[in-house]
Amino acid sequence: MALRKVVGLAIICLVGLGLTVGPALAKGPNLDAWKPAFDPSGAKYTCMVSNVSHPVIRGVYTGFAIRDELWKRTNGQIYLNFKPFSMLGGEVEVLNQLQMGAIQGMGVSSVAATNLGPRFGVVNLPFLINSFDKLDKFASSGKLFDHFMMAMDHQGIIGIDITGYGNYGWATVKPVRTIEEAQKLKFRTAEAAVNQLTYKAWGINPVAMPWPDVPVALKQGVIDGLDHTPMVCNITKKFEVAKYFTYVNYAQGLFIWIFNKAWFEKLPPDLQKTFVEVVHDVCAQIRKETVAQESEQIAKATAAGIEFISLSAKDNAWLQEKGNAVHVKYAPEINELYPSDKYRPDNFLKEVQDFVGYKP
């Protein structure tokens, strides 16, 4: 019950973010650089899909790649109208739009996804699916991944596949080489219960903060660092203030590509099949590109003077040991089964842990 209260508070915070950011984006960013090379006006079916971030990130660009490939393979029958940059609002309000059918799809962050599908939280647990190799292994696991993607099915939302934005670590204004140094700083984290509990388990001060507030907070010293990936920190210029990055690699940043079930089921069977195949094919390719993009962004940041730091093996082992408490805390949420679930494991989390080789 306490967990549900924490999640509820996170929802309230995220809704507040959506209401705050929405007006600022009312004019909308310029999408000319990503215009389709075709006229979508003749499409029989239109699918409006949202994402909060910048399409220069390959995991976000996925939406445009799906749009173009879907148009090609359906001979112009389906037009996926992709809206990145939070053009349709914050993630929680967009999730509500998706559930109601006001929009048809979303590349939702794994953090926000737990609001309607707690099972999605398995990918946020510390040191579980925390590398590109583990992510690919999980995505190819068959019944485990299929069960994961069913997390919102009971909410009228189907999940098809995932893309990412790299490995989480610490971008800081001071170098962090030990846990003791990290525990002296204030870290911005996402407004989600799993992130808050992870940092508290590590004895590190988490500051839940909307993403748009981070630049000013860093400059004013409200926070000393942030929990994010090197790719995002470099692309969004957080390294202009936080000039150190400590590798932690405790989780992968993910976008989960989800769609309104009622809309999808109205498509003819052949188009349903093509739709799913396109999303799978594009996501698999983008995940490969994301590996390269992280390396490229780290190289660019290093050339610009950003120092990248690795913790000792002892400190990494300590972080994993303390982080296991979050696994235990979230197990009931992740293991809950719903009437529409086809696979009904006794302990889904344990099966995922065993599959990827996680040792508590």
Image (cartoon, rainbow, N blue to C red):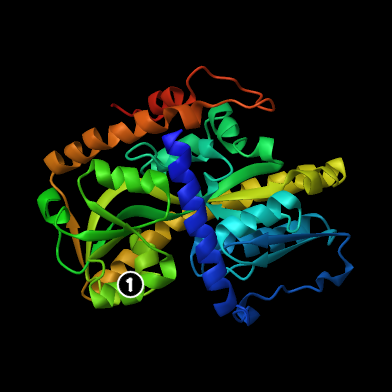
- In the rendered structure, the answer to whether residue 197 lies left or right of residue 149 reads left
Q: Secondary structure at mark 1?
A: helix
Observer-nearest residue: 221 or 312? 221
Q: Quick check: 341 left or right of 324?
A: right
The residue labelled by disc 1 is 238
Q: Residue at x 20, y 46 (%)?
A: 203
On the image, the x and y values in percent for residue 127 come to 32, 39
> 112 above or below 83?
above
User: Looking at the rendering, which quadrant does residue 151 occupy?
Assistant: top right
Name the foreground residue: 36 vs 232. Answer: 232
Closest to the observer: 288 or 319? 319
Q: Is residue 34 above or below residue 188?
A: below
**Mark 1 residue crowding within 10 angstroms, few (<14) / some (14–19) / many (20+):** some
Counting from the top left corner in percent of width and height, residue 355 is at: 42, 26
Work out whether 104 lies above or below 38.
Answer: above
Is residue 319 toward the left or the right of residue 156 in the image?
left
Where is residue 11? Give x, y as percent: 51, 52
Residue displayed at 49% across by 31% down? 334
Q: Residue at 28%, 72% (x, y): give it.
A: 218
Kindly tell me whether residue 102 is visible in this rendering: yes
Kind of residue sitting beneath label 1? Lys
Count every numbered label the image shows and give the total: 1
Inspect this view and state whether residue 284 appears. Answer: no
Q: Position of residue 10 (x, y in %)?
A: 46, 51
- The quadrant the C terminus occupies is top left
From this view, report whether residue 336 is shown above or below residue 180: above
Residue 341 position by quadrant:
top right
